[in-house]
Image (spheres, rainbow, N blue to C red):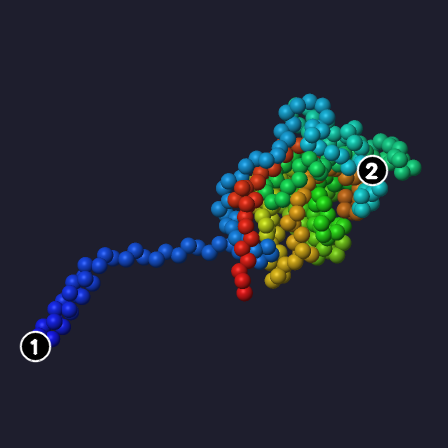
C-alpha cells in the first residue's frame, strides 16, 4: 500500500511539473546563404547595402584629364580588330564644364609605325591608378552617332594572371556600334566564352536617347556573378553556373584586379561590319562622371569550403 501511495504521488508531481513548464519558443531557421562553388565564399548579394565610394572622377576641373587617375593606350596597330584610328596620348581628350569629352577626328596622323592614319581618337585607362576586384562600377555617358563608330566602357585585367586575351577575361560594361543606333551591349569574354569562338555571353537593351542624353552604365561585380544595368535597371546577368556545373578559370577568371577603359574606336571588325558613313568626320563620347564603389562585406569575405 505504501508503494502504491508513493507511485501515485510521483505521478502527480510529474504532471504538475509538466503543466508548469513554460511554452517553448518556436525554432526559426535562418534562410540559407548563397554558396559559391567557384571560390567557396558565402554571401547574400541582395543584402549588400554597405557600398562605399573608393574611386571617382567627377570632372569638376578644366583642361586635360587628371593625370593622377588616367593613363592612355597609344598606337594605331588595329588593336586586334582592324580598327582605323590612331590613339593619341592627350590630343583627343579634354575636360570642360564638368564633362570629359573623348573625340574621334578624321585627320591624317603620321605614326611611328611608318603609316599615316586617317583617324585619331583616345583610349583612356586607369591601369595602375585605379585597379579593382569586385564592386560596382558606374559611368554616366552620352554616346556618339555615326555609322562606323564603336565607343566602349569596359575593363581589362591589370596583370593578366591567366594568360593573354581572352584567358584572363574582359568585362564590357557598355558597347555600341553606330550602324545599330541606340542598342546597348554588355558582354564578358573568357577562354571559354569569347567572340572569336562566337561563345561570348552578352545582353542587349535599346535606349532611344543613348546619344542625346546621359545614361548610367554599370556593372555589379560579385565573387561569382555580374549584374549589368542601365540607369539602375538590370538587363543582363552573367552567372557561370547557368552554363556549367563546376566553373573553372576558363569560365570565370574574374578573381583578379581589373582596370577601366574609355574609348571610341573607328571602323574595325564590328564597328564597320555594315560599312562606314563616307560623310563621317567627327564623333564624341561625353562622360559626366566615373564612380567605383566597393563593399567591405564583400571585400572581407572569408573562404568557407566544406570538407567532404
- The total of numbered circles placed on residues is 2
Q: Is residue 262 at least partly visible in the picture? A: no
Front label number (2 vs 1): 1
Identify the residue shown where x is 72% and y is 23%.
Answer: 63
Question: In the rendered image, which quarter is residue 138 located in?
Answer: top right
Q: Where is residue 246 in the image (x, y as percent from the top left)?
A: 62, 61
Closest to the observer: 295 or 77? 295
Q: Is label 2 in a helix, a strand or a loop?
A: loop
Q: Which residue is farthest front?
A: 2
Q: In this view, does 5 lie above or below 270?
A: below
Q: Which residue is farthest left?
A: 1
Identify the residue shown where x is 80% and y is 36%.
Answer: 74
Closest to the observer: 70 or 272? 70
Identify the residue shown where x is 76% and y is 50%.
Answer: 164
Mark 1 is surrounded, within 10 Å at the Cα level, by few (under 14), some (14 to 19) or many (20 or more) other residues, namely few
Tell me the quarter of the image containing the N terminus: bottom left
Q: Is residue 125 above or below residue 24?
A: above
Tell me the quarter of the image containing the C terminus: bottom right
Q: Is residue 199 left or right of residue 81?
A: left
Marks 2 and 1, the one that precedes in the sequence: 1
Q: Which residue is under mark 1?
A: 1
CA gap, disc 2 to disc 1? Answer: 109 Å
Q: Is residue 41 left or right of residue 116?
A: left
The reply to whether the C-beta atoms of the residues labelled 2 and 1 are less than 8 Å apart is no
Q: Is residue 145 above or below residue 237?
A: above
Q: Position of residue 180 (x, y in %)?
A: 71, 44
Q: Which residue is under mark 2?
A: 75
Q: Position of residue 175 (x, y in %)?
A: 69, 43
Q: Position of residue 133 (x, y in %)?
A: 63, 44
Amino acid at each position: 500500500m505504501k508503494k502504491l501511495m508513493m507511485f501515485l504521488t510521483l505521478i502527480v508531481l510529474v504532471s504538475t511539473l509538466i503543466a508548469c513548464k513554460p511554452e517553448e519558443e518556436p525554432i526559426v531557421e535562418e534562410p540559407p546563404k548563397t554558396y559559391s562553388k567557384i571560390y567557396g565564399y558565402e554571401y547574400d548579394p541582395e543584402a549588400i547595402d554597405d557600398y562605399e565610394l573608393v574611386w571617382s572622377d567627377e570632372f569638376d576641373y578644366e583642361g586635360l584629364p587628371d593625370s593622377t587617375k588616367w593613363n592612355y593606350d597609344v598606337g594605331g596597330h588595329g588593336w586586334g580588330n582592324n580598327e582605323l584610328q590612331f590613339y593619341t596620348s592627350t590630343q583627343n581628350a579634354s575636360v570642360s564644364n564638368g564633362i570629359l569629352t573623348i573625340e574621334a577626328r578624321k585627320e591624317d596622323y603620321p605614326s611611328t609605325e611608318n603609316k599615316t592614319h586617317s583617324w585619331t581618337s583616345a583610349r583612356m585607362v586607369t591601369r595602375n591608378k585605379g585597379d579593382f576586384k569586385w564592386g560596382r562600377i558606374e559611368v554616366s555617358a552620352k554616346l556618339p552617332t555615326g555609322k562606323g563608330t564603336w565607343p566602349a566602357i569596359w575593363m581589362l585585367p591589370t596583370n593578366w594572371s591567366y594568360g593573354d586575351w581572352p584567358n584572363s577575361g574582359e568585362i564590357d560594361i557598355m558597347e555600341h556600334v553606330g550602324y545599330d543606333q541606340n542598342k546597348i551591349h554588355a558582354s564578358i569574354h573568357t577562354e571559354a566564352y569569347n567572340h572569336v569562338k562566337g561563345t561570348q555571353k552578352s545582353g542587349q537593351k535599346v535606349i532611344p536617347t543613348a546619344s542625346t542624353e546621359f545614361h548610367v552604365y554599370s556593372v555589379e561585380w560579385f565573387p561569382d556573378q555580374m549584374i549589368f544595368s542601365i540607369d539602375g535597371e538590370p538587363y543582363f546577368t552573367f552567372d557561370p553556373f547557368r552554363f556549367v556545373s563546376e566553373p573553372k578559370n576558363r569560365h570565370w577568371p574574374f578573381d583578379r584586379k581589373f582596370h577601366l577603359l574609355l574609348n571610341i574606336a573607328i571602323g574595325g571588325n564590328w564597328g564597320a561590319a555594315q560599312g562606314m558613313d563616307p560623310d563621317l568626320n567627327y564623333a564624341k563620347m561625353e562622360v559626366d562622371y566615373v564612380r567605383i564603389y566597393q563593399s567591405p562585406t564583400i571585400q572581407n569575405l572569408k573562404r568557407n569550403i566544406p570538407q567532404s
